[in-house]
Amino acid sequence: MITPTWMPLMRRFSVLGFAVMIATHTLSAQSTLSHDNAFPTIIPSAESSSLEATGPTGGGVLDAVPAAPAAGGAGAGQNGSDNKRFYSFSHIAFEGGGGFSAPIGNDTPYITWGGHFIAGAGLHFSPRFTVLGEFQFLDNKLPGAFVAAGGGQTGNSHIISLTVDPVVDLFPKRVNSAYLTGGGGYYYKSTNFNVLGGYDFYGYPVFITANSFSSSQGGFNLGFGFTHRLGGVYGDGQMKLFGEARYIYIHTPPITETNGLGTTELIPVTFGIRW
């Protein structure tokens, strides 16, 4: 069989066309890959947008908005500061002192001069007004005739008190000021008759209590005093020296009752320091 002359020519064109198709497809794939590398696709994420809006560099819009205060921030902080300021150390009051005391009234036959000390603590409610809780111990001697009648050689009267006493400063802004005070509370009084029990190692006499009686009752006090402020750049320190005199009335049992010597009245004079 004789093959027509155009068949070899068609085969050559077919092979050439197939080769051109392969070459075109290869070039197209390389061009697409090169375009993707040159211009990568950027997809913004929520995280990057948020970071851009509130970025630490201060360029974001949200940087201009102040942060909201924590719960209970402003109001609670202010009230907390006020409470802390009220209970600060400057509002706490202290005192300590001592001195001498003398009897007055109908108890002079049963008690005589002596010494005492006082300690107290409380609160300054204002520069003018303070309330103190005070502990006081008074040690007074007994008159000789009364000691002999009680069967002793020496004697003493001990008075212990726990009272609440307001103090009103008349001139709170001055370095030197005056004040009024007074209050009342619980008083315990014991009367003791002592006899010689022997001598100690150094030869001093030792007395023992041979007879004693006591009573517990209420009482009150009234006083007047002066203060001198210490310290402070402008004389406004918290510490003060004070000197005062008080009248003390103790409702001890009458002499007609057991353990009674009648009401007790004393004038203690005290010198000390207050904060």
Image (tube, rainbow, N blue to C red):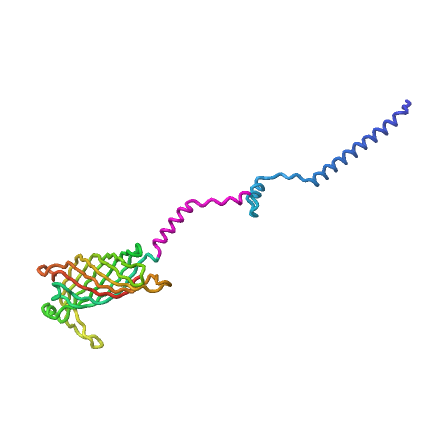
Q: State which quadrant residue 182 falls in.
A: bottom left
Residue 168 position in % (x across, y down): 26, 57
Which quarter shows the C terminus? bottom left
Which quarter shows the N terminus? top right
Residue 196 position in % (x across, y down): 15, 72
Q: Which segment is the magenta one?
A: 61-88
Q: Is residue 268 left or right of residue 57?
A: left
49 vs 197, nearest the viewer: 49
Q: Is residue 25 magenta?
A: no
How many numbered marks have been drawn onto this rendered protein structure?
A: 0
Q: State which quadrant residue 156 falls in.
A: bottom left
177 vs 195, nearest the viewer: 177
Residue 86 position in % (x across, y down): 34, 53
- Name the residue located 70 percent from the left edge and 41 percent from the top edge: 38
Q: Is residue 65 magenta?
A: yes
- Name the residue located 66 percent from the left edge and 38 percent from the top edge: 41
Compared with 108, 131 (above or below) is above
Residue 267 position in % (x across, y down): 18, 64
Q: State which quadrant residue 100 falls in.
A: bottom left
The outermost residue toward the top is 1
Compared with 37, 117 (above or below) is below
123 vs 206, nearest the viewer: 123
